[in-house]
Image: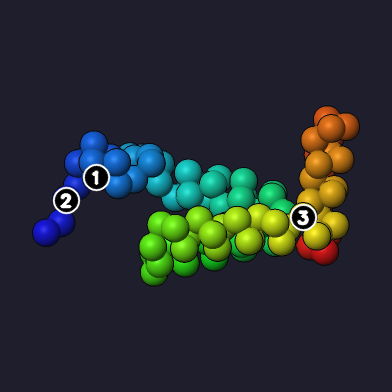
Amino acid sequence: DMIDAETASSYGLVSRVYPTEELVEEAIGMGLKIASKGRMASLMAKECVNVSMEVSLEEGLRFERRMFHGLFATKDQKEGMSAFLEKRKPNFTNE
């Protein structure tokens, strides 16, 4: 059965509900925000969400932990941490 957006929100199934006339603008804004992050971290986060739909909670958390640890071997992780500590915008290179 279909439910409306407000009901989905009250059930905790969605994180935000926007009026129809604002939806495209908000979606583009969210996409731009995600695009400003490190590409590898964004791809791994998406993969974690996808895997979580197919495995148990324990397996999903283990997978997420492995992905998180794997990111520490990247140049982008080091750039992100440096930028944070230096209070500047990161320059990710997808490496």
Which residue is located at x 55 percent, y 45 percent? 29
Give the residue type at disc 2: Ile
Front position among marks 1 and 3: 3
Decide which of 94, 82 is in the foreground and name it.
Answer: 82
| Separation (CA) of disc 3 from disc 2 | 41 Å
Mark 3 Cα within 10 Å, few/some/many (few <14, many 20+)?
Answer: few
Which of the two labelled residues, at mark 2 and mark 1, occupies the earlier sequence position?
2
Is residue 95 among what the camera can see? yes
Which residue is located at x 53 percent, y 50 percent? 28
Which residue is located at x 69 percent, y 50 percent? 37
Give the residue type at disc 1: Ala
Q: Which residue is mark 2?
A: 3
Mark 1 Cα within 10 Å, few/some/many (few <14, many 20+)?
Answer: some
Mark 2 vs 1: CB contact within 8 A: yes
Is residue 46 among what the camera can see? no
| Above/below status of 59 relative to 33 | below
Q: Which residue is mark 1?
A: 8
Give the residue type at disc 3: Phe
Quadrant containing the C terminus is bottom right
Could you tell me residue 7's position as x and y percent? 19, 41
Mark 2 Cα within 10 Å, few/some/many (few <14, many 20+)?
Answer: few
Asked which secondary structure carries label 1, the reply is helix
Q: Which residue is mark 3?
A: 72
| Separation (CA) of disc 2 from disc 1 | 7 Å
Which of the two labelled residues, at mark 1 and mark 3, occupies the earlier sequence position?
1
Could you tell me residue 93's position as x and y percent? 83, 59
| Above/below status of 17 relative to 41 | above
Quadrant containing the N terminus is bottom left
Asked which secondary structure carries label 3, the reply is loop
